[in-house]
Image: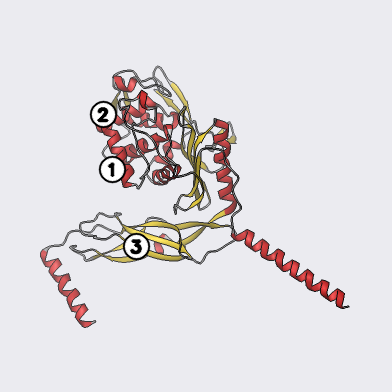
Amino acid sequence: MQENSGKGKDMRYVKLLVALCLLVSLCLPSRAMDLDSAACLLMDAKSGRILYEKDADEPRAIASLTKIMTLVLILEEMALGKISPDDVVVASPYANSMTGTRIWLEPYEKMTLGELVYSVAVGSANDAAVALAEHIAGTEADFVLKMNQRALELGLTSTSFGNSTGLPAKYTAQPDWPNYSTAKDMARLCQHAITVPGFLEYVSTYHYSVREGRKPQIELWNLNKILERTVGGKTYGYIGVDGIKTGTTTEAGYCIGATALRGNLRLIAVILGADNEEQRTEEATALFDYGFRNFQAQLVTEKEAFRLPVKVPLSATYQVEAVLGEDFYVAVPKGTREQLEVEAVLIEGLAAPLEKGEAVGHLVCRCEGVELGRAPLLTSGRVKKGSILHIAYYVLRDMLVNLLE
């Protein structure tokens, strides 16, 4: 009887051990497969949390992923109302001289800005990218200055743009300007790009006709093979992928920045330096499989549930409410519900005037001291600069409050 009792205890211990192992497996994501591309990264798009990376800080040539920044600048200008899809763009002889993928722009040919944006987003046309750059900045060189300035503003500290296309330097007018980035910076650029109005609409388009009804009409097909699309009633690509961009040169290899959305979880995958198109497709797919299999989106706070009064010196209203632009989610391992800590970190030196929707800080989410992600805090309304009477009133009020305390 004692022997059977001992076996019973042993079985209970085994069952407990198995249960603990199952619990740990739920709490920790499985190890991603080894990938052969030179560099890769998987990111939670909403929080910026990196879920997997390999040599993601190593600067490399990025080929036509360069055009992500070109599209960002164009569409940001469009969102501000400075340009319109209906604007007429005149192609220069320099734009006509571009090699590689193109729509065969003739010197001084006129085309709408919207048509050229589709040509870049869908067909990765180099001549169209240069024509857009010249339309915005006068010359491609001046446009590149804007590209690099925007990169600094977005915190892309390991990125340098030398042209608007990603073509090797010998094919551009600025052969001494380097064009490179990292998988991490490209993921961050993609993270910003998908928030730019119109960006996803353009890059998720599978087919576009250039010069439709005019000669020579050219049919463009999106080069992103994992883009989800339906053709002839049949669905192709990776479920949830709705962008962003591929690129290929001898120096860069085969590259892609892609994004996929399933439920509330949006992921960004970047592959740099794959050996061929098949490897690029397989490894981008592997990254998405890993992410959606092992992670889920956990709500930190709903957009409408968060409002934080923020003091704004020298303003007419003294303060403004900081709000979230959208519901704040972070990626956590499947089968878990993390105990999340939230902290508002405000920009130092805030002062009026401020426009509605202007960033005044971040809402930072942590778990056991480890940052999982952050969401921008935005002004709920416009904050006007205060008059001398406003400023004097609030200064005296603060002094009285401090004395009473």
Name which residue lies at 40% across and 62% down.
304
Residue position for label 3: 345
The C terminus appears in which quarter of the rendering? Answer: bottom left
Task: Determine whether 396 is above or below 212 in the image.
Answer: below
Asked which secondary structure carries label 2, the reply is loop
Task: Determine whether 162 is above or below 242 in the image.
Answer: above
Residue 211 picture location, percent across and down: 39, 22
Separation of marks 2 and 3 at Cα, in angstroms: 40 Å
The N terminus appears in which quarter of the rendering? Answer: bottom right
Front tag of 2 and 1: 2
Residue position for label 2: 139
Q: Is residue 46 left or right of residue 307?
A: right
Separation of marks 2 and 1 at Cα, in angstroms: 21 Å
Front residue (pair 132, 246): 246
- Give the quadrant of residue 18: bottom right
- Kindly identify which numbered label has been placed on residue 80: 1
Asked if labels 1 and 3 touch by Cβ distance under 8 angstroms, the answer is no
* Disc 1 packing (10 Å; few <14; some 14–19; many ≥20): few
Q: Which amino acid type is shown beneath numbered disc 1?
A: Leu
Name which residue lies at 29% across and 27% down.
89
Residue 296 picture location, percent across and down: 55, 55
